[in-house]
Image (spheres, grey):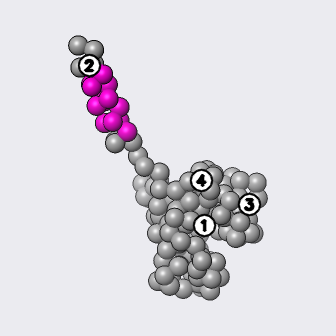
């Protein structure tokens, strides 16, 4: 009877471990690796140069995909292409996990939406911002 309880307990624990979500990156390591990113994108104590570039609280998986596009040249941006050129995929996952762990910044622009980061239902309910004629809306 005791052996059966032990076997059932082991099966239950292994089922729980197998169903637990696997974190892609390590935020602690990511904080150490993000020194090149902090100037523009901020950190836990520094907001970054431009509030529109803050990455805090953004989805780590989406950030990793977009960062890999910069690394491979699918998105061309001289500063970002150069900044991520020497990171490997694991380092990018760690850095994006760090930025996700920060939580949303205290101030973000109501006029700038980064595609895919926010809930589509909340965006649909929000009124459209006023656009000055002749100026494109940032997407």
| Circle nearer the viewer, 1 or 2 | 2
Count residues near mark 3 (Cα–Cα under 10 Å), then give few for <14, some for 14-19, many for 20+: many
Please tell me in which quadrant of the rendered image residue 129 appears. bottom right
| Circle nearer the viewer, 4 or 2 | 2
> How far apart are the alpha carbons under marks 4 and 2?
40 Å
Magenta-colored span: 6-17
Count residues near mark 2 (Cα–Cα under 10 Å), then give few for <14, some for 14-19, many for 20+: few
| Circle nearer the viewer, 1 or 4 | 4
> How far apart are the alpha carbons under marks 1 and 3?
18 Å
State yes or no: discs 1 and 4 in contact (Cβ < 8 Å).
Answer: no
Viewer-nearest residue: 71 or 13: 13
Which badge, 2 or 3, is on the more N-terminal residue?
Answer: 2
With respect to residue 104, does 34 lie above or below?
Answer: below
Give the numbered dot on residue 27: 4
Which badge, 4 or 2, is on the more N-terminal residue?
Answer: 2
Residue lying at 34% horizontally and 42% vertically, measured from the top left: 18
Q: Secondary structure at mark 3?
A: loop
Read off the residue under disc 1.
111
Read off the residue under disc 2.
3
């Amino acid at each position: 009877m005791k052996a059966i309880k032990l076997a059932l307990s082991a099966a239950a624990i292994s089922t729980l471990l197998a169903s637990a979500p696997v974190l892609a990156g390590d935020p602690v390591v990511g904080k150490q690796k993000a020194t090149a990113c902090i100037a523009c994108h901020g950190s836990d104590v520094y907001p970054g140069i431009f509030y529109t570039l803050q990455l805090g609280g953004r989805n780590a998986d989406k950030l990793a995909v977009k960062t890999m596009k910069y690394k491979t040249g699918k998105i061309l941006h001289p500063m970002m292409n150069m900044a991520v050129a020497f990171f490997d995929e694991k380092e990018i996952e760690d850095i994006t996990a760090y930025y996700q762990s920060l939580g949303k910044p205290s101030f973000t622009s109501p006029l700038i939406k980064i595609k895919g980061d926010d809930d589509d239902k909340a965006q649909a309910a929000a009124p459209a911002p006023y656009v000055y004629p002749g100026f494109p809306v940032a997407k």
